[in-house]
């Protein structure tokens, strides 16, 4: 290999090997570490002292000493068409959808508008250190084309899909069961596994789909078993009551999706708040994953995710912003609120666990371990450079920490986009914080 294909980065280095909630050897931490990247993939990660001797003479070592190098964050649930309506006031989910969401999403029939928002949205993700996201587009197929065109130009590993929605929504945003299935299949063929793009079959949520649409979504999920599925479930109580009315034969909200064959590996369910034991058990049995969206759940007053019961049942977990219901693109801010949601529910989330959930935990929940999420040899080199001295307060607090847990906790509680000094995707720098 020529030295041009080889890049090395020196910094404190952290990545995960297992879930800290269930393993004593969950992570790999090197105070003075080295990450070696060859052709956009991780070649080695470890101690600087032992690894630097393996570098061919003349290899440039990028020096990020004093900073932390870790895998890029993974945000498993957010809506790119809602970028322009983040932080819009409304009393709860259903009025918020009607007042803001639907009018804003209607503009995405225009591919030029979609392309413009997609560029801003991706800039913002990278500023926050998020290198992979599971993204809802709008009901318009061209909104998916606009998104993947933009993410592929930057070489990003992204998952996205066209919203399927054929009832209980304004006419100008309504597809039909047949058109949504036809469009979804065409988009799968165009984008799934094209470069680093992956497709998600995306019924918005059960109330906006007819039984026929859910049936066809389930058929697509069976026909294309390595695609993703993403939707919302059990977010707030009014919505759950509505689902009981619309689907009186279903035992529970998640059971609606289950009956159409949409619980399986690579199915990602947003929220999962108002679950019972059988719902949680079914998530674990089918290896369907939960996208926990704390800033959104607090903002809309939806409820508190129960970490303890989810862990007891073995539900695969991940963290997500749920922008525009969520109030920040930052996974650090998402951890901040996740911590408080856990406290209010009587459980405790160590910082190590939160960073795991935002990296390897999410990759596992998405069945992408080995591809993204940690620095295993051969994984795609998506990583971030985190600055513990990004703000005067962070500098003061992190200067006094006595353990890795304390350092990560301070970053999660006090950090945001300012703490991300640089973001790399497949070994290429895609964001660098501008000097303030
Ligand atoms: Zn959502």
Image (tube, helix red, strand yellow):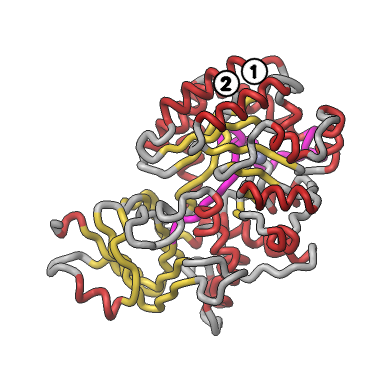
Report x, y in % for residue 357: 57, 59
Report x, y in % for residue 256: 74, 34
Category of crowding for the residue at label 1, using alpha-carbon neighbours closer than 10 angstroms: few (below 14), some (14–19), many (at least 20): many
**Relative to 44, 289 lies left or right:** right
- 399 versus 414 height, above or below: below
Q: Which residues are magenta?
A: 71-95
Residue 422 covered by magenta stretch: no
Rendered residue at 50%/23% (across/down): 185
| Secondary structure state at the residue bearing disc 2 | helix
Residue 331 is tagged as none
Total labels drawn: 2
Image quadrant holding the C terminus, namely bottom left
Q: Are marks 1 and 2 in contact (CB under 8 Å)?
A: yes
Res 400 quadrant in image: bottom right
Residue 177 is tagged as 1
Res 197 quadrant in image: top left
- 71 versus 251 height, above or below: below
């Amino acid at each position: 290999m020529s030295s041009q294909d080889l890049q090395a980065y020196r910094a404190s280095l952290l990545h995960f090997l297992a879930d800290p909630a269930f393993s004593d050897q969950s992570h790999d931490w090197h105070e003075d570490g080295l990450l070696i990247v060859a052709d956009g993939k991780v070649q080695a990660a470890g101690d600087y002292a032992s690894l630097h001797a393996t570098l061919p003479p003349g290899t440039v070592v990028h020096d990020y000493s004093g900073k932390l190098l870790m895998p890029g964050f993974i945000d498993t649930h957010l809506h790119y068409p809602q970028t322009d309506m983040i932080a819009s006031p409304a009393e709860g989910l259903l009025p918020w959808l009607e007042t803001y969401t639907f009018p804003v999403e209607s503009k995405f029939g225009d591919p030029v508008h979609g392309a413009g928002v997609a560029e801003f949205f991706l800039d913002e993700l990278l500023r926050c250190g998020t290198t992979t996201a599971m993204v809802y587009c709008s009901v318009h197929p061209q909104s998916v084309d606009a998104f993947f065109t933009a993410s592929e130009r930057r070489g990003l590993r992204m998952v996205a899909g066209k919203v399927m929605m054929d009832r209980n929504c304004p006419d100008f945003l309504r597809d039909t069961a047949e058109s949504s299935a036809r469009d979804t299949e065409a988009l799968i063929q165009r984008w799934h596994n094209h470069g680093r793009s992956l497709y998600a079959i995306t019924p918005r949520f059960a109330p906006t789909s007819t039984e026929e649409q859910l049936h066809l979504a389930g058929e697509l999920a069976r026909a294309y078993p390595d695609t993703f599925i993403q939707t919302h479930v059990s977010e707030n109580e009014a919505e759950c009551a509505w689902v009981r009315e619309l689907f009186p034969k279903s035992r529970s909200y998640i059971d609606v999706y289950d009956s159409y064959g949409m619980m399986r590996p690579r199915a990602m369910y947003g929220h999962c708040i108002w679950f019972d034991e059988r719902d949680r058990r079914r998530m674990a049995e089918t290896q369907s994953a939960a996208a926990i969206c704390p800033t959104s759940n607090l903002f809309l007053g939806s409820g508190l995710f129960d970490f303890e019961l989810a862990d007891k049942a073995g539900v695969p977990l991940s963290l997500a912003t749920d922008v525009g219901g969520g109030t920040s693109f930052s996974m650090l801010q998402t951890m901040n609120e996740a911590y408080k949601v856990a406290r209010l529910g009587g459980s405790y989330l160590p910082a190590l666990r939160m960073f795991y959930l935002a990296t390897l935990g999410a990759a596992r929940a998405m069945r992408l371990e080995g591809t993204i999420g940690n620095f295993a040899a051969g994984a795609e080199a998506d990583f971030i450079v985190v600055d513990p001295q990004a703000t005067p307060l962070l500098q003061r607090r992190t200067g006094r920490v006595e353990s890795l847990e304390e350092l990560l906790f301070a970053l999660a509680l006090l950090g945001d986009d300012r703490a991300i000094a640089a973001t790399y995707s497949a070994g290429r720098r895609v964001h660098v914080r501008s000097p303030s």
